[in-house]
Image: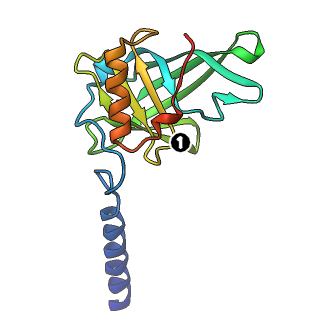
Amino acid sequence: MIRPMIRSLALALLLSGCSALVPTQPAPGLPTTVPAVDLSRYTGVWHEVARLPVSFQDGPTLRCEGVTATYTARPDGRIDVTNRCRNALDGGTVREATAIGTPQPGSGNARLRVAFFWPFHGDYWVIGLDPEYRWAVVGTPDRDMLWLLSRTPEMAPADYARAVEIARGQGFPVERLQRTAP
């Protein structure tokens, strides 16, 4: 009788310790997100203005141009994501990928876990956001991916410079940024 109680207590302590290891804020050294994102204002169409090169957008047979990301609110609080681009290396063939974004607890909706196919996901952190939601700076915690997004295919030079400075200040390799052809 005592042994099962001790085992149950040990299991409860172990599980409570595991839940304490899940951070609600980024660990030191990781990029800092904006305090909050109003998902109702964030939904809609965004145009990619610049990005760090990544294999799923840039490769020997792929160069994404005219990139858009459409975010649509779901009744369950998550976000439907549809990414589209034209492959400049394949006569402008349209490519599309869909995913579901899940806001991470304690992030004010500034950190999304985006799953294009289960069980794989990517972290999508909003590290810069215009107060009017005209542009956004989105990156990954490892700083390997970065996107500058705008509600229009082009950003005003001052807005672009501000977005680049936000990314630079967060330690992203902005010297590798490449402009996205509209």
Establish if 12 lies above or below 135: below
Question: Please, which residue is most extreme toward the bottom here?
Answer: 2
Horizontal placement of 154 versus 25: left or right?
right
Residue 41, percent from left and from top? 29, 18
Q: Is residue 111 above or below residue 85?
A: below
State the image coordinates of residue 112 (x, y, percent, origin top left). Answer: 40, 37
Q: Position of residue 171 (x, y in %)?
A: 39, 45
Q: Mark yes or no: residue 126 visible.
A: no
Q: Which sits in the foreground, 47 or 83?
A: 47
Position of residue 149 measured from the top left corner of the image (x, y, whole percent):
42, 21
- Name the residue tied to disc 1: 121
**Residue 123 sits above or below residue 149 on the image:** below
Task: Name the residue at 45% across, 41% down.
Answer: 140
Of 78 and 163, nearer the camera is: 163
Q: Which quarter of the rendered picture does the N terminus lie within? A: bottom left
Q: Can you say which quadrant of the picture contains the C terminus?
A: top right
Residue 165 visible in the snapshot: yes
> Which amino acid, mark 1?
His
Residue 162, by quadrant, is: top left
SS at badge 1:
strand
- Identity of the residue drawn at 34% across and 32% down: 165
Q: Indicate the quadrant where residue 75 lies.
A: top left
Q: As displayed, is residue 62 above or below residue 151?
A: below
